[in-house]
Amino acid sequence: MLKQLFLFVALAGTAAAARAQELYVYTEPASNMATNSLGVRLTNKFFPMDHVDYTGYRVQPEVMFGASKRLMLHASGYFSNMMQKQFEFEGASVYAKYRFISVDDVQSHFRVAAFVKGSLINNPYMPPLRDHDHTAKPYSNEDLDLDGSSSGVSGGIVATQLLHKLALSGTVAYDRYMRNTKDEMPLFFSKNALNYSVSAGYLLLPRKYKNYKQTNVNLYVEFLGKSNLDQYRRSYYIDMAPALQFIINSNSRVDLGYRWQLYGDMDRVMDRSFLVRYEFNFYNIRKQQ
């Protein structure tokens, strides 16, 4: 029995290490977390704001659940001072991802999943200008999202290919933005957008896997794009987001990332940000029937 238990733990650790480089920092992979596992995550984002005299800060607590080998669920809350001068609760979102294609091979696999997301947000659509600053230029905020900026729904497809220590992923999603509970959406804002991304992750350490307690170090580079689709104001951006990740004891992880704009003509209240995240996972939280 002890031998079987040791073998199970070793295999589980090896599988976790093989998938480590798929745990992207700014996007979700097509793979899911283990069935009957529960993850808790705290994401901190810092935004140097263009039109206010303070640094925006958003904290996002999140709970994730592996409902089955194909279905994964998330629930998130948002707290920030980005769109209001005081730190406030901004709203919440729910997310579901269903994996419908799995092709496995030795040290490689291919996954495709569909996902949907819905958000209910109570923010205004534009942050306040600097106090007593009559020289501030007029601006608009064309960069809406479902992570604290706007209410709405999203749906898309993600495909991920693992090739030994390298994992590649691509995502395409459609966003439909809706009225926030606290503010009417300005008429000139785009209510429809296309989001797209290409992500790569590489396992730096360990060079040779020995046991599941070894710390994994992963390097990521992600390119995140968006295009507003409404006729009266079509605009776009493409951001680059490198990140470093540490997976500790196979159950917790630390992410450090920086994101900035490479190209684009979209009016944004910020075009760069820093990310710090901690996540912890509980496995086998309920017994199989």
Image: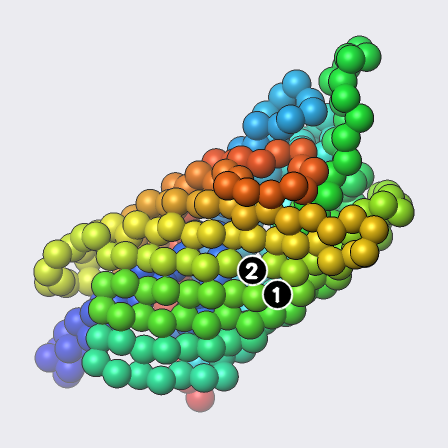
- In the image, what residue type sits under mark 2? Tyr
Q: Nearer the viewer, residue 176 or 18?
A: 176
Is residue 279 rendered to the left or right of residue 192? Answer: left
Residue at the extreme bottom of the image, as rendered: 289
Q: Nearer the viewer, residue 288 or 61?
A: 61
Instruction: Please report contact status of discs 2 and 1: CB closer than 8 Å, yes or no.
Output: yes
Give the CA separation, mark 2 to mark 1: 6 Å
Kindly identify which residue carries mark 1: 173
- In the image, what residue type sits under mark 1? Ala
Label 1 crowd (10 A; few <14 / some 14-19 / many >=20): some
**Can residue 230 be seen at all in this image of the molecule?**
yes
Residue 39 screen position, x and y as percent: 45, 60
Q: Relative to 9, is 208 above or below?
A: above
- Mark 2 or mark 1: which comes first in sequence? 1
Label 2 crowd (10 A; few <14 / some 14-19 / many >=20): some
Locate the N terminus by quadrant: bottom left
Residue 196 is marked as: 2
**Image point (20%, 62%), residue name:** 212
Residue 96 screen position, x and y as percent: 59, 70
